[in-house]
Amino acid sequence: MAFNNESTTDEVLAGFDLSGRRFAITGAASGLGEESTRALAAHGASVLMLARDPEKNIEAASRIRAEVPDADLSLDVVDLADLASIRSFATRFLGGGQPIDVLLNNAGVMACPFGHTADGFEMQFGTNHLGHFELTRLLQPAVVAGNQPRIVNLSSAAHGISDVDLDDPNYEHGDYDAWISYGRSKSANALHALALGSRLADDGVLAFSVHPGGIRTNLGRHLDDDLMQQMLERSKERAAKSGESGGMRFKSIPQGAATQVWAATTPDVVGHSGAYLADCGVGVEGVNVGRNGFEPYITDESRADALWSLSEQLIDA
Ligand SMILES: NC(=O)c1ccc[n+]([C@@H]2O[C@H](COP(=O)([O-])OP(=O)(O)OC[C@H]3O[C@@H](n4cnc5c(N)ncnc54)[C@H](OP(=O)(O)O)[C@@H]3O)[C@@H](O)[C@H]2O)c1
C-alpha cells in the first residue's frame, strides 16, 4: 500500500501483528523515538527503550503505558556520547542472549554548541554517528540472530548541508559551524546504513536511513534566533533550487515517526537495502532534498567504506 508525507505511524502499521518481534530503539524517551515505541508496542511488538537518562525513560514508558496498557517494554541506559556506556550496555544485553529483530538508531543531537563526547569526538559526529556505529557493531551478533532483521538509522534532509569530512571529522581545523556539523553527521548516518546494507547482506540483514520530515520536537533545544534564521534561509534556498514553494512545512509527531516504523516493518523496501527513505517511500536522487530527495554523495559506496574504516580507526584508537 502506498503512503505519503501525511501518513501516520498507526496508518503505516494498520493490519500488522508485531507480536513476538523484538525492537531496540535509541532516543526512546522523547519525540520520534517515544512515538515509534508507542506505535510498535500498540501493534504487539516487544520494545527495548534505550535512553541516556533513566528517569526520562521511565516517564516516557509511563506515558506509553497510559495509552497502551499491555505494552511490552523494557528499559536500559545508553549514553551515545560515551563509548564506555555503550560497551557496558552491550555487554549487559548480549549476556542475556536475546536477539534483536530491528535496531532503530534514532537518538540525535542537532546544532549544539561546539563540544566533545567523553572520548574526545566532536559532539554531533561523535553522538549521532560514532556512538551509533559502535552500538551497531557491538549489537551485530544479536541483530544477525534476529528474525528478518533490519537496522534503521535516522538521517535527515540536513544531510544536504554537507557531505562527511573524512579529513577533519572532529573539527580539529577550521571554524565550527553547528549546521555543517549536523549535516555531516546526518550524511554519516546515511552512509553507515548504506555500508551496513552491503556488509550484512549475506546475513540477511536489511539496513535503511530515514529522513522523518520536519517535526517540532526537543531536537531544536539548541536553536537560538541566529541558528533558526540560518535554518530558514537554508530551507528557502533548497526550496528555490528545486522549484518548490511554501518554505518549510512541519509534520505532526505521528507523521514524523511514520517513515521509521514503515522502514522497520514494511515488505515494500525488501529490495532496497541501503536506501535513504523519506515520506514513507524510497528517496529520489537530486530533487527536493528538503522533502524526499537526496544528494548523490550519500549513495557513494566508496565514501561509505572510507567512513567505515575511519570510524573503526577513531573508535579503536
Ligand atoms: N525533528 C525533526 O524535525 C527531525 C528532522 C530530521 C531528522 N531528525 C532526526 O530524528 C531523530 C529523533 O529526533 P527527535 O526529533 O525525536 O528529537 P528529540 O525529541 O530531541 O529526540 C532525540 C533523542 O536523542 C537522545 N539523545 C541525545 N543525545 C544522546 C546521547 N548522547 N545518548 C543517548 N541519547 C541521546 C535525546 O535524549 P535527551 O532528551 O536525554 O537529550 C532524545 O531522547 C534524530 O536522530 C534527529 O536527527 C529529526
Image (cartoon, rainbow, N blue to C red):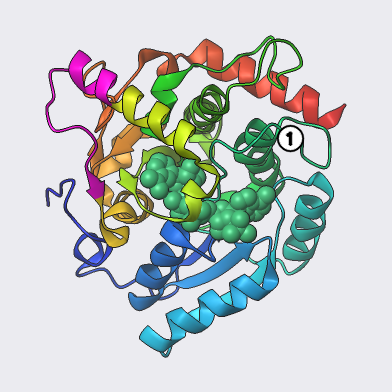
Between 308 and 169, the residue placed more toward the observer is 169
User: Percent from the top left, x then y, of residue 246?
Assistant: 13, 33
> Residue placed at 52% from the left, 75% from the top?
60
Could you tell me the amino acid type at mark 1?
Gly
Q: Is mark 1 within 8 Å of ligand 1?
A: no
Q: Kindly tell me whether residue 251 is visible in this rendering.
A: yes
Residue 181: within the magenta? no
User: Percent from the top left, x then y, of residue 59?
Assistant: 56, 79
Q: Specify the quadrant of the image occupied by residue 114.
A: top right
> Residue placed at 47% from the left, 60% from the top?
33
Between 316 and 172, the residue placed more toward the observer is 172
User: Percent from the top left, x then y, of residue 286?
Assistant: 26, 15
From this view, report whether residue 256 is shown above or below residue 24. Answer: above
Between 148 and 55, the residue placed more toward the observer is 55
Q: Secondary structure at mark 1?
A: loop
All told, the count of numbered labels is 1
Residue 237: within the magenta? yes
The range drawn in magenta is 236-250
> Residue placed at 35% from the left, 77% from the top?
42
Q: Is residue 293 left or right of residue 91?
A: left
